[in-house]
Amino acid sequence: VQLVESGGGLVQAGGSLRLSCAVSGSIFSDNAMAWYRQAPGKEREMVAVINIRKGTDYAKFVKGRFTIARDNRKNMLYLQMNSLKPGDTAMYYCVDCEDQYYCSEYVRRNWGQGTQVTVSS
């Protein structure tokens, strides 16, 4: 499975970015997908997950600001990030979850290389 993220960059606080992830080698429409992030010196944390029915779940710290979406025809995953804060600065990872609904540590997961998001104050 290959996952290639794009769309990261430097943005001022209050700005927006849209991350994209191209997925190959996976039965994309049969798997839940997720975005995780990791900031320097911090543990990796789940940002958002979308299941095969396009149901979504978000971490409390991004709810109302970020939107996860998937295009099963194009094998693409997206993360629209609005009202960005300096605390959102992290490496963002696209994750293919070998389960239809969940993407926890109990599920086999495939990771992309990540795309850096930096939010300046």
Image (spheres, rainbow, N blue to C red):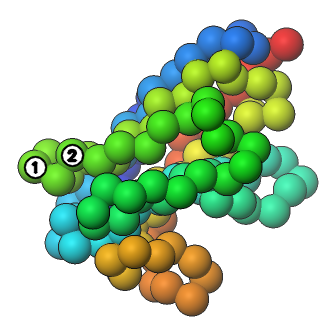
Q: Is residue 26 left or right of residue 85?
A: left
Q: Which mark is residue 81?
A: none
- Residue 16 coordinates in the image, percent (x, y): 56, 17
Q: Residue at x 81, y 25 (%)?
A: 86
Q: Residue at x 75, y 44 (%)?
A: 61
Circle 1: is it few (<14), some (14-19), or many (20+) Cα within 10 Å? few
The amino acid on which the numbered mark 1 sits, given as a three-letter code, is: Arg
- Numbered label tally: 2
The amino acid on which the numbered mark 2 sits, given as a three-letter code, is: Asp
Are dots 1 and 2 in contact, CB under 8 Å? yes
Question: Tag 2's secondary structure?
Answer: strand
Residue 80 appears in the figure? yes
Q: Is residue 14 above or below residue 101?
A: above
Q: Looking at the image, which is closer to me, 98 or 62?
A: 62
Q: Quadrant of residue 11?
A: top right
Q: Is residue 63 above or below residue 12?
A: below
Question: Tag 1's secondary structure?
Answer: loop
Q: Is residue 105 left or right of residue 49?
A: right
Residue 26 appears in the figure? no
Q: Find disc 2 in the rendering and name its residue.
A: 71
Q: Find disc 1 in the rendering and name its residue.
A: 73
- Residue 14 coordinates in the image, percent (x, y): 70, 12
Q: Quadrant of residue 9?
A: top right
Q: Is residue 116 above or below residue 36?
A: above
Q: Residue at x 69, y 23 (%)?
A: 84
